Amino acid sequence: MPNINVPVFSESVSEGTLLSWNKKPGDSVKRGEVLAEIETDKVVLEVTALQDGVLSSVSAQEGDTVLSEQVIGVLGEAGAAAPAAPAAAQDAAAGPVAGESTAGGTAAQPDSSSQSAQAQQSSGNAPALSPAVRKVVAENNLDASQIPATGPKGNITKQDAVTAASAPAAPQAPASTPAAAPAAPVQSGPRAEQRVPMTRIRQRIAERLKDVQNTAAILTTFNEVNMKPAMDLRKKYQDLFVAKHGVKLGFMSLFVRAATEALKAFPAVNASIDGKDIVYHGFYDMGIAVASERGLVVPILRDTDQLSLADIEKAISGFAQKAKAGKLTMEDMSGGTFSITNGGTFGSMMSTPIINAPQSAILGMHNIIERPIAQNGQVVIAPMMYLALSYDHRIIDGKEAVQFLVTIKNYLEDPARILLDL
């Protein structure tokens, strides 16, 4: 019988956490069907069935730490009966909170709501839940089988769970046995608290950002850009752009192209430090920060100097969809020589973005706000955006950083220069 193995991790990933089993021993499976999900410090990986059959047994439980290519189960032939799980394994199956573990790798003790959510998921009365939905169900002690599903194939979406959580609670029958004492109880009253272990991805984000602050000499320079020319360009050609390319023309593609041209003019901003060496990259791989339910992720646009505006918009749209569905791969997230983050989508007026190591700089976009400015000796109202460039002063001088940001400003205030390669 074929083994079920953990996918091969990249060199920078040493271990992962078994987030969930979508099947239980004895369930029939189809080739290509997702059997389990594994969270690494970068992405969530899917373990799929290599053939039709029956999930015969599992050797790792939800919340366990797993290694690259580790055997976590066995897939039997179709029609084969699954062996009865030992009592110890049954107890363990109800234990760890899916996707969460202590720093030492030992699964944290679950609270009663997490046990309820896992029991509901493993029963035949409730559909398989995504990690985001399972989190809402566990935190609000919901009965997944009672949540109206609006997702494809009858799946429960996160919004379905949130809606159910905000609805008035129905009275519940008393349990036949006393509930286990929760590891992190939520207190009632106006000063409620809840202690929840960090996910592996959130832990990694925290480690990387703190390492950057401890290592790099980070400074931030600011400027502002009049977005009216870019807005006029987008308004004039939006319909034609959508008709030809099937995707909307956004501001991000203009920023990517402007930043790429600026990187060509100032190679140090596209460089990185390796030990006592400065590595100047002859290519332009740009990280685009995307907010996901698991935290900030930064998929990489490769060779941006070779991409059209349409290519960039399609790639960014694809990344956003994959991030929302939890389908970003390690390849999507690896590498990068420069990054852009857009806090303006959340209403941020100004911020100091933090560098994504081992890169040496990051561009921050912000909210577009109409305000009075002086133009040709007159006071006019214009849509203005503040730009921020955080940079590593160890290899980028202040003069270079300022000129780099001014170059981006000039391209955006005269976007025809991007199209004419001027």
Image (spheres, rainbow, N blue to C red):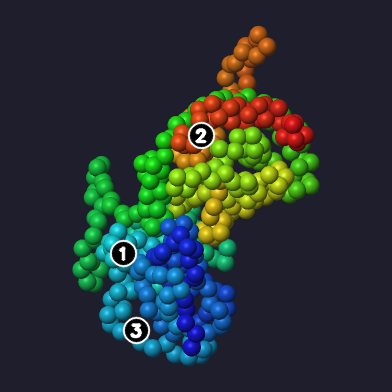
**Percent from the top left, x then y, of residue 326?**
51, 58
Label 1 to label 3, Cα distance in Å? 24 Å
Up/down of 151 relative to 317, above or below: below
* Residue that numbered label 3 is attached to: 85
User: In the image, what residue occupies the spot 42% across and 75% down?
Assistant: 70
Mark 3 or mark 2, which has the lower sequence index? 3
149 over 190 or under it: above or below:
below
Q: Badge 2: how crowded within 10 Å, few (<14), some, or many (20+)?
A: many
Residue behind mark 2: 396
Task: Read off the residue under disc 1.
Answer: 105
Is residue 124 in sight in this rendering? no
Q: Is residue 369 above or below residue 217?
A: above
Location of residue 205 in the rendering, given as x and y in whole percent from the top left corner: 41, 50
Query: N-terminal of the two: label 2 or label 1?
Result: 1
User: Where does residue 347 sit, x and y in percent of width and height?
Assistant: 50, 34
Q: Amino acid at mark 2?
A: Ile
